[in-house]
Image (cartoon, helix red, strand yellow):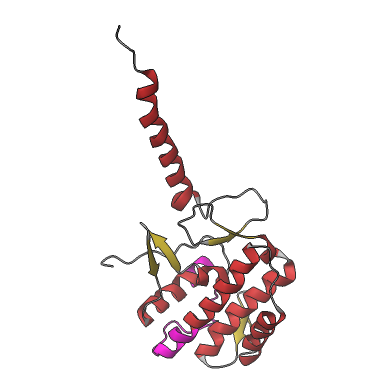
Amino acid sequence: MGQLESFPLISGHLSLDLVNTELVRRGTKHDLLVNVADLDRWIEEMKQSGSLHPLSVPSTYDTPEVLRNLRELRASLRNAFLRITEGISPESDFVHTMERLVASAPLSYQLNEDNLVAIPVGTPDAAIASLVALDVLQLLASGALLTLRRCANPDCVLLFLDASGKRKWCSMKICGNRAKVARHEHKRKKSPNQNMDIDA
């Protein structure tokens, strides 16, 4: 891709925003975490969105191993999350895996501008995985993860939380407006035929 694709930050949660770094554009699946530069850009956007505190993880990752491990974690999360959207509760093995990831880089805390910041103690690789896993466990503990939904657009792979039970689209900007335009175009194409006068 010539132009950098923006990350669809539609959930406000680190684990979901990681899974949503895979998306479909014009019928083609795109992976937005292809190289270390993509990972650094994602980390920076997570910090700017508030899903990550700047003190929690390094600004840059100079090893492809971190990227490879995070992509493996993303695949595991996607499988588990899709099962949840189908009404299947997370298996205990999945929960234990998340707990082990947190334990691999346990959290210390630092007071920063009156905010308590969680800072994983461990390698940079383990640190980001620990924070992603912690987000999953917090979503499970609150019950919010059980409101996980897939976008109503069958070609879209993005996931989101739906506390209201009424949300259909990953976002109005991405799929909602597209569906509205498609409906409008369909009606426009049908209406001339319906309103045509028949000459005697």
Q: Is residue 36 left or right of residue 142?
A: left
Q: Is residue 65 one of those drawn in magenta? A: yes
Residue closer to the observer: 159 or 119: 159
At 40% from the left edge and 88% from the top edge, which residue is drawn? Answer: 64
At 46% from the left edge and 40% from the top edge, which residue is drawn? Answer: 180
Q: Classify 153 as above or below 181.
A: below
Predominant secondary structure in magenta? loop
At 57% from the left edge and 73% from the top edge, which residue is drawn? Answer: 79
Residue closer to the observer: 194 or 61: 194
At 47% from the left edge and 84% from the top edge, which residue is drawn? Answer: 58
Q: Residue 169 at what x, y percent from top left?
A: 53, 51
Decide if residue 115 is in sight here. no
Q: Residue 87 at what x, y percent from top left?
A: 68, 63
Q: Is residue 11 one of those drawn in magenta? A: no
Q: Which residues are magenta?
A: 47-69
Count of marks overlaid on the render: 0
Which residue is outermost to the left? 2
Q: Residue 23 at what x, y percent from top left?
A: 43, 64
Which residue is outermost to the front? 200
Q: Residue 198 at what x, y percent from top left?
A: 33, 12
Which quadrant of the view contains residue 183? top left
Quadrant of the rendering where the C terminus is positioned: top left
Which quadrant of the view contains residue 22? bottom left
Quadrant of the rendering where the N terminus is positioned: bottom left
Q: Classify 172 as above or below 35.
A: above
